[in-house]
Amino acid sequence: MSSLQPVRGTHDLMFDDMRRHRHIEAVALEIAGRYGYGEIATPVFEFTEVFTRTLGDTSDIVTKEMYTFTTKGGESITLRPEGTAGVARAFITGGLAQQTPLKFFYRGPMFRHERPQKGRQRQFHQIGAELIGVAGPQADVEVIALAAHILKELKVAGTITLQLNSLGDVESRLAYRDVLVKYLSERRDQLSEESRARLERNPLRVLDSKDPGDQAAIKDAPRFTQYLNEASTTFFREVQDGLTALDIAFTLNPSLVRGLDYYSHTAFEFTTDALGAQGTVLAGGRYDGLIKDMGGPQTPGIGWAAGIERLSMLLSDLAPAKRPLAVIPVGAAEERPAELLTAELRRAGFSVDLGYGGNMGKRMKRANKVSAIAALILGEDEVKNGVVTLRNLDSGEQSSVPRTELMAQLKPFA
Ligand code: ATP
Ligand code: MG
């Protein structure tokens, strides 16, 4: 029955996957805290306009990937495809303009209707950071340093390189746009249909194309850096100097333009060869025009987002979860005392597994299955004498421990 399948491109996260997911979030949150970022959770859905106005109506996300629906009240709502627009909306509706600089960290599900494949889901999860209200290149350096720090702390940095480009300010972008349109127009027949459409509406985006024909046509296109005006060149130089000073290696990538309309100056991606075609794990850039475009006060911003699923694929195995104790009643009469002992141990902070039935052998098997570190066996004699048989499940060592000493004896297993 199709309605009992998960929707294509969505996944149930459980146990080990969920632990990896949480680990990535927890590490990122902790490191972001050191840089002064506070957490924000914006709604999972917004008025569609929040995204169409910010992402630009030529972006892939807006033209193809959004989950948009009309509510019973006739409002057009969209499941968020990314985090920045919601944060910018929250900044404006919260009237936070007087409180800048502001640093936001977020995490959560995003939704894009695209073709599912390895590292590409329709519901996926991101961690992300936004620094709002700082116009200077120190912000770019710090935001990138935060990203690099998180990747390093997650121990995934080994396979990842930082790609860097500048999209310049508005003046530079317009100048470059003209040159690029001229160049691409002369090679129109070589371009894919999609790129031909982009050439009309948003030519810079052609540089972002993954189509092999397009890539060949783009290869010798004029480079953005040649058309940066002086202010933009200086800005870009300062970003690079700042990164170099912090020992953050980068590769200049003139065709890195990012898929969204609102970027200016710094654009960056952390990419890997380890994930096939879905090689971008973290991407971001400066968005000085975004908040104004949305109807807020002119406010610069810069941020990034990383896909948790992609990071998770790069993560090596986590340390095993804390091993529980197993409480094992020998017969029916000991069930209740075993429940009470279990409750007492859990209140004391231990993680305890209480098999839910079966004979002693079956319960021992269960204890092994949950990797219990020790078994606490309660039989008739134990209950009568106020003791517990404590068996170390690794060494097999066993001893009879008076209940009064139990907590002290269990310390090594805590
Ligand atoms: P791509 O080029 O892979 O489509 P993008 O440019 O659309 O990526 P961004 O919008 O910059 O991606 O999102 C930031 C990060 O979120 C990506 O680098 C990636 O790690 C992750 N991401 C984006 N889309 C998906 C998806 N559909 N499934 C899983 N992760 C995704
Ligand atoms: Mg995409």
Image (cartoon, rainbow, N blue to C red):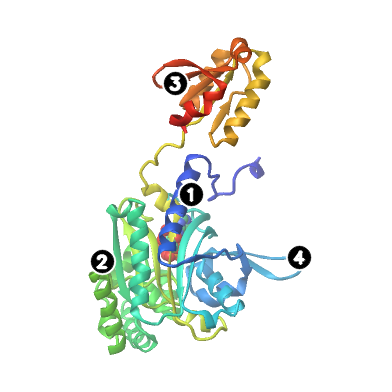
Report which residue position mark 2 lands on. 250
Q: Earlier in the sequence, mark 4 or mark 2?
A: 4
Please say whether residue 299 is visible from this viewpoint: yes
Q: Which label sits on residue 22?
A: 1
- Report the number of numbered marks: 4
Q: Residue at x 41, y 63 (%)?
A: 34
Q: Amino acid at mark 3?
A: Leu
Report which residue position mark 4 lands on. 72
Q: Which label sits on residue 393?
A: 3
Q: Residue at x 23, y 70 (%)?
A: 244
Q: Residue at x 33, y 84 (%)?
A: 176
Q: Amino acid at mark 2?
A: Phe
How crowded is the residue under tag 2: few (<14 C-alpha within 10 Å), some, or many (20+)? some
Q: Earlier in the sequence, mark 4 or mark 1?
A: 1
State if disc 3 and disc 1 touch (CB < 8 Å): no
**Circle nearer the viewer, 4 or 3:** 3
User: Tag 4, which secondary structure?
Assistant: loop
Q: Earlier in the sequence, mark 4 or mark 3?
A: 4
